Amino acid sequence: MRRRSPPLVVRLAVGAAILGPLVGGCAGAATALPATAPLAGGLPVRRHPVALATGRLYTTPDGGFYQDPAVMDVYYARRVRLPPVLALLPPADRRAARDLAGDGPLLEVVARATNRGASTGSVSLANTVLESQRTSQLVPRRVRGAVTHTFYEPIRPILVLASRPLDLCAASIAPGGSVWLLAVFPPVDPRVRVALVAQGLYGFYLPVASGGVPPGLPLRLYTGDVNRCVQASVG
């Protein structure tokens, strides 16, 4: 029987070498960290991690007739602070998101999508929502009124990030290629099991702060305006 070597575990240090485009950061000295670093750094990196869950989705280059399969591997979910998220939001969204201060940490989901098809397609986490057996129980007890309507009906991302440029919150992937996708959701009650759902595609419960991510997640990521993406999809 072939013995497996123990997994290599490394944490992405915020001071690690930075590669890729500067998005959401300041164009200062070469050692300056991008604004996306707090959301991409500090994750447990393993050489051969097992995804928490895997969903299959289909991309289409021609509006729906031809469809290519893609795989969405969700590797990690963790709680993150509000200030780094505020720094990446458009001004109007930033003002609204400040109402979440005091409701606890936000929930970040880290995934990687791989194109298994024969043509270039687009993938996104902007169309995902958080649910549970009783979704209303995910809403923190102190959340009331307009905040509930804005952020919890449904519980969709307030920020999406990707390792490739975003077009209406979706990143394109060439055949055989992969892209990192991150989504940050509003605070949810940590006592309630949380599921990530893409209607009609996949849905699974996610343990928080469990597992690890493969190497290669850059600290510099592209961000997308989720509200603009949602308005375009229903317009």
Image (spheres, rainbow, N blue to C red):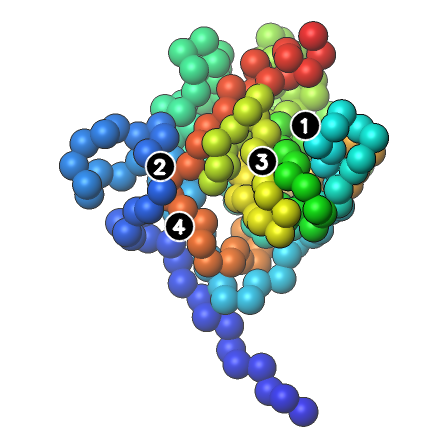
Q: Where is the C terminus found, in terms of image quarters?
A: top right
Q: Earlier in the sequence, mark 1 or mark 4?
A: 4
Q: Is residue 9 above or below residue 54?
A: below
How far is mark 1 from mark 3, CA to CA? 15 Å
Q: Earlier in the sequence, mark 2 or mark 4?
A: 2
Q: How dense is the environment of label 3, judged by Cα within 10 Å: few (below 14), some, or many (20 and up)?
A: some
Q: Position of residue 114 (x, y in %)?
A: 63, 49
Which residue occupies 53% across, 44% down?
Answer: 180
Identify the residue position indicated by label 3 in the image: 172
Identify the residue position indicated by label 4 in the image: 42
Q: Position of residue 32 (x, y in %)?
A: 22, 38
Residue type at numbered disc 1 = Asn
Q: Earlier in the sequence, mark 1 or mark 2?
A: 2
| Labelled pair 3, 2 in contact (Cβ < 8 Å) | no
Residue type at numbered disc 3 = Ser
Instruction: Give 88 or 166, whichever is nearer the viewer.
Output: 166
Q: Is residue 188 visible?
A: no
Q: Secondary structure at mark 1?
A: loop
Q: Earlier in the sequence, mark 1 or mark 3?
A: 1
Q: Secondary structure at mark 4?
A: loop
Q: Position of residue 139 (x, y in %)?
A: 65, 26
Q: Secondary structure at mark 2?
A: loop
Identify the residue position indicated by label 2 in the image: 21
Disc number lying in front (1 or 2): 2
Q: How dense is the environment of label 4, judged by Cα within 10 Å: few (below 14), some, or many (20 and up)?
A: some
How far is mark 1 from mark 2, CA to CA? 25 Å
Residue type at numbered disc 2 = Pro
Q: Which mark is residue 127?
A: 1
